[in-house]
């Protein structure tokens, strides 16, 4: 198979972890006789510095014409510490999601046998966890009307959803649930928010189309508590943009490190794959960042194109690296810590 992949390294540790994912993908392509064509493009603070825009038109064209996008991270401290900045790296991320129509962020949460005791949660609580959160990505409070009143002392952000936006995400959730344990949980705040009542009403109306799926409805605050108490109770979850942003980061600690969790963002046509961690600017350029989440995101990419053996091979060598201690400093726990580039080299050589 020939795949054209847009390569958006972004900011901070993005370029370093992306480099390792490329090494691994190229090794897989060589082993399984595929042709990968990488197309680098600018985004985030790097793009602002180069052309004054965090998601340039040239980058969008590359992404639109690619089969998939492999993305690193966006963000830089000089923008975080300047609330008056008119152009921000994160605007590029939102613009990219909107222009590519990436409406569903798919974040798996699972445990690694060799790392289960590194989680801040007790072994007996997290063993067997294998859940998937679908976060709506192009609506809600991040894209609603916002502003400040005339006196400058009152600000507002509006959470707006259409039935169609909810339906397309829920449809994807139902379809994925059918391939798993046929359990789906809709996470909302329907006791307070009108937008959440529309979520619940819409999903309830869709239940008849998926009679084999057992659907539950829970408030987001209760889920936030239950995720750290009984995470294995959940399988597929669907939720709004803001709620999903928070819950997926909370769920990531179950594995023991945010540096281990991959994700994909899918639209009607476009597909984007990225680690869930941020740009981690404190580690940028030091060759110490954990590349495994980005590598596992690449595994999701192969899987979505039907290349299941290739995805399994990536996951095999990742698990092998964890079991044998070929890890960066965040997982070394007093043992030898390997450099980001060394982990990437080892994974590629193992393939």
Image (cartoon, rainbow, N blue to C red):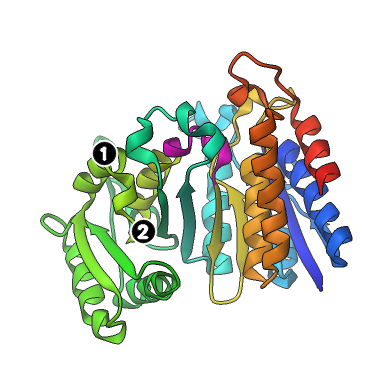
Q: Residue at x 48, y 59 (%)?
A: 105
Q: Dot 2: within a 10 Å radius of its alpha carbon, few (fewer than 14), some, or many (20 or more) residues?
A: many
Residue 260 falls inside the magenta stretch? yes
Q: Which residues are magenta?
A: 253-261
The answer to whether residue 103 is above or below residue 247 is: below
Residue 38 quadrant: bottom right
Please state if 86 lies on the left or on the right of 153 as rendered. right
Q: Residue furthest top?
A: 334
Give how far across and how far down residue 160 sits, in percent. Answer: 29, 63
Query: Which of the two labelled residues, at mark 2 and mark 1, occupies the earlier sequence position?
Result: 1
User: Vertically, is 342 above or below 31?
Assistant: above
Residue appearing at x 68%, y 28% in the figure: 325
Q: CA distance from mark 2 to mark 1?
A: 15 Å
Question: 88 or 40, which is in the foreground?
Answer: 40
Image x and y of residue 293, in percent: 61, 43
Locate residue 114 relative to residue 318 in the image: left or right: left
Q: What number is the disc on residue 176?
A: none
Q: Which mark is residue 235?
A: 2
Where residue 31 appears, as percent x and y from the top left, is 86, 59
Q: Which mark is residue 229?
A: 1
The residue shown at (58%, 43%) is: 89
């Amino acid at each position: 198979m020939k795949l054209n992949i847009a390569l958006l390294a972004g900011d901070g540790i993005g370029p370093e972890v992306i480099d390792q994912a490329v090494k691994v993908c190229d090794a897989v392509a060589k082993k399984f006789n595929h042709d990968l064509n990488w197309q680098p493009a600018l985004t985030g603070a790097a793009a602002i510095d180069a052309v004054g825009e965090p998601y340039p038109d040239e980058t969008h064209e590359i992404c639109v014409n690619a089969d998939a996008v492999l993305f690193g991270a966006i963000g830089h401290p000089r923008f975080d510490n300047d609330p008056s900045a008119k152009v921000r790296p994160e605007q590029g991320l939102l613009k990219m999601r909107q222009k590519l129509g990436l409406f569903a962020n798919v974040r798996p949460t699972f445990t690694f046998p060799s790392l289960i005791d590194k989680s801040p949660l007790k072994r007996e609580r997290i063993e067997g966890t294998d859940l998937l959160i679908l976060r709506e990505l192009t609506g809600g409070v991040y894209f609603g009307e916002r502003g400040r009143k005339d006196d400058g002392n009152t600000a507002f952000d509006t959470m707006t959803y259409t039935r169609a936006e909810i339906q397309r995400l829920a449809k994807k959730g139902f379809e994925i649930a059918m391939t798993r344990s046929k359990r789906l949980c809709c996470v909302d705040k329907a006791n307070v928010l009108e937008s959440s009542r529309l979520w619940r009403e819409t999903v309830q109306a869709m239940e008849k189309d998926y009679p084999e799926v057992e659907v539950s409805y829970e408030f987001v605050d209760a889920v936030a508590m239950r995720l750290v108490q009984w995470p294995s109770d959940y399988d597929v979850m669907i939720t709004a943009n803001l709620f999903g942003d928070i819950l997926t980061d909370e769920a990531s600690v179950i594995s023991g490190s945010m540096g281990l969790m991959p994700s994909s963002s899918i639209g009607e046509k476009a597909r984007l794959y990225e680690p869930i961690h941020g740009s981690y600017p404190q580690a940028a350029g030091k060759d110490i960042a954990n590349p495994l989440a980005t590598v596992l995101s690449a595994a999701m990419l192969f899987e979505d194109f039907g290349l299941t053996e290739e995805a399994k091979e990536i996951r095999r060598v990742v698990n092998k690296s964890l079991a044998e201690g070929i890890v960066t400093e965040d997982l070394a726990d007093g043992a030898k810590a390997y450099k980001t580039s060394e982990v990437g080299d080892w994974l590629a050589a193992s393939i």
